[in-house]
Amino acid sequence: MLKVCNIVIVGGEGDLAFRKLYPALYSLHRENLLADCTKIVCFGRGKYKREKFYQNMRTWAEKSEYVKALDDDSWNRFCERVVQFSGDATSAKDMKRMREEVGPEEMVFYLSTPPSIFAPICKALGDANIVTKSTRLVVEKPLGESLETFNQINDTLFEVFQESQIYRIDHYLGKETVQNLLALRFANIFFEPLWNRNYIDHVQVTVAESVGVGGRWGYYNEAGALRDMVQNHLLQLLCLVAMEFPARNKADDIRDEKLKIIRSLKPINTTNVTQNTIRGQYTEGSISQKLVPGYAQEKDADKESDTETFVAIKAEIENNRWQGVPFYLRTGKRMSNRYSEIVIQFKPVVFKFIDIDPNVLNANQLVIRLQPNEGIQMNLMNKVPGLSEGTSLQNVGLNLSFEDAFEKHRSPSAYERLLLDVTRGDQTLFMRTDELRGAWKWVDGIIDGWSKTGQPARSYKAGSMGPDDALALMIQDKRKWQSFEG
Ligand code: BG6
């Protein structure tokens, strides 16, 4: 049964709304996943006249890689759902007016606005008396820049909403390949017996971006790569790799297990921050043969900024399954390629009945490619065919490409999945308060360590894979980063 609820996008004339939310809502509409009478309310300041607004929506939908062909008939029917509403989202009077115009059905409020106005918007919703037990609130990051500021923002939400009504977005959790992590681990019998410190040497998580900071220099300079990417996306990936079997496939059971991992992270602070983290900042370089400026030369940049655009961390989980298995995390802007992957590096076999050339990587690897070319690769040792004396071995990849395996299936965007789950009332892919508190606490330790030790951001050339020190982080442990193979 499709749930009837109206979806109000507050900040409905903003970048995120046009780029991601409307294309995703259109796809849901086209797949008949919205109830017939669901309305989409674009709550904005009235920046765009009606015609220009619809034209913008269409342009972005056509550009979306997930929408692909857009057909006029379904697009026109989608537009009939859309209500363009102009008003001040921090005014209770305007909220009431909107409610009268749109109707009494259940509402989802998606705050696609800066968090600095979450509080007055929630107050306006409360004062307008339009929040019921089944109203839902969706909020986007950045939710604070420390545990303290997260708590402040979160507390303002609690003045009007309860935890069960709040959907905090981490769009990585909406990605198909990220959701597949749990299926891969828990629906295949051969991983579980090996998924522990006895057989796994270490885990690598890389989220590399080739883009720079775009027009967001101001925000980014305050945040840096640690807050922008690690506190949320990379920690969530780490949790999905490391968590135990949940008792049931229910939102809170899954989130309970993730929380245990976050709480088991070994603290990084002044005493160990320099051994376990590397900060970097890109300088001028070239990507895909195009010259790009350094971070400090970007538009609106402060030339003296020491903000990190790259970070590498050796994280450790102190529990029975993972004791002694490092999780190396790295992420950065303006790196050589855009790719995200998780590498599970297994230990080599103990008894070597064949002499293995020391130059051959003699252990199995499971490589989970999250984007692009989504898929899974299992690297296995094989005999090289031939009649030469002795046996030579080679590590060969067994490849599963999602595109080939599921060619008849369309892969939905992260926002389609997340928006749909909000309408269904499923909080599994959204972050709970305690998870975020735990993540901020861990990240605060690193930030405090950086500030007390004065750890500088090392330069790296745009188009590289980060500063050399990031290599050293693994070399000191006699390991190396997996290099990207296209
Ligand atoms: C966002 C960050 O959360 O994720 C951006 O704020 C980053 O800086 C983006 O570019 C990356 O998302 P994706 O889906 O392109 O990997």
Image (cartoon, rainbow, N blue to C red):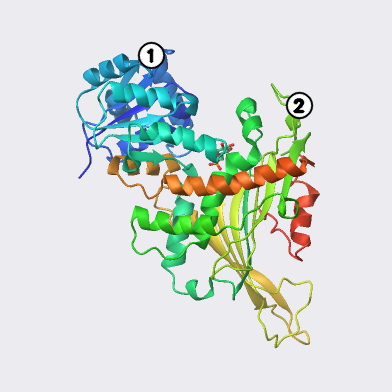
Regarding residue 5, the answer to whether it shows in the image is: yes
Task: Determine the quadrant in which ligand 1 lies.
Answer: top right
- Where residue 232 sits: x, y (%)? 53, 45
Q: Secondary structure at mark 2?
A: helix
The answer to which of 394 and 22 lies nearer the viewer is 22
- Where residue 228 sits: x, y (%)? 59, 39
Q: Is mark 2 within 8 Å of ligand 1?
A: no
Query: Tag 1 or tag 2, which sits nearer the N-term?
Result: 1
Q: Is residue 130 above or below residue 287?
A: above
Q: Three-letter amino acid code at disc 1?
A: Glu
Q: How busy is the neighbourhood of tag 1: few (under 14 within 10 Å), some, or many (20 plus)?
A: few
Residue 114: which disc? none
- Where residue 410 sits: x, y (%)? 40, 47
According to the image, label 2 marks what residue?
Answer: 297
Residue at image x 21%, y 34%?
A: 36
Q: Across the whole image, how many numbered discs are drawn on residues?
A: 2
According to the image, label 1 marks what residue?
Answer: 51
